[in-house]
Amino acid sequence: MMPGETTAQELDFWNRCGNVFDRNKYPADSFEVRETVYELEDTRIILTILHAVFSLEETEDQTWIEQRKDDWLLGSRYLGFVSMSEGGVALPERQLLQDFFIIKSSGEFTGAYYLISMEGDWYEIPGNELFMDKAGKMLYTYVPYECGGCAIGKFDVAGRELTTKFSGGGDDAWPEVKDRKDYVSLFWDCTWVKW
């Protein structure tokens, strides 16, 4: 190893446990935890919100998502802070894909959509907006023009193949999509996660 290298991810004051939430890292007199459980076949999706008791700011609440089958952890991800001026963490009003659970973590112009399959496979699709063709076979993400050079993705639902690229921003990102009006926005109606 080179001097100054580290083998462990450095954690900060806020995210003390990385991608897997550990309640023991946050004293009960300073932090409260709320969990919401969603069923996906024989697995459970657990959304955890951590609230700092000493803070009046919602922007300091954080979220993690994990998938478990019985007591086995299949996957977990730190999603960041729940509400910011231009983003946060959101769930669609309805989960439209039968074999997947979808959640969004976003910033001002971009973010990521996490697709969690009932078998425990996780896919991260970069982008700001998520659209699905009416047949439910393809997902496409977009970013606004202000985010030219940001990553976007398309996902083949049946083949479970993810393709990513950098976008110039706007509507012309995917040549095969002639008009987004012919597609369904999965997060047009969504619920922003809050304490």
Image (cartoon, rainbow, N blue to C red):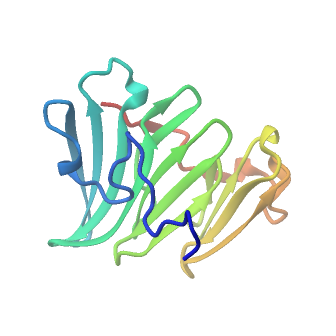
- Residue 81 visible within the image: yes
Q: Is residue 137 left or right of residue 191?
A: right
The residue that appears at 54% across and 79% down in the rendered structure is 158
- Residue 91 visible within the image: no
Tell me residue 79's x, y (percent): 44, 49
The residue that appears at 68% across and 40% down in the rendered structure is 109
Q: Is residue 108 left or right of residue 88?
A: right
Locate the C terminus by quadrant.
top left
The residue closer to the viewer here, 110 or 40, is 110
Question: Would you identify the image quadrant in which residue 58 lies?
Answer: top left
Question: Would you identify the image quadrant in which residue 19 lies?
Answer: bottom left
The residue that appears at 17% across and 39% down in the rendered structure is 27
Tell me residue 107's x, y (percent): 59, 39
The residue closer to the viewer here, 96 or 127, is 127
Image height check: is 149 above or below 118? above
Image height check: is 152 above or below 94? below
The residue closer to the viewer here, 174 or 7, is 7
Locate the N terminus by quadrant.
bottom right
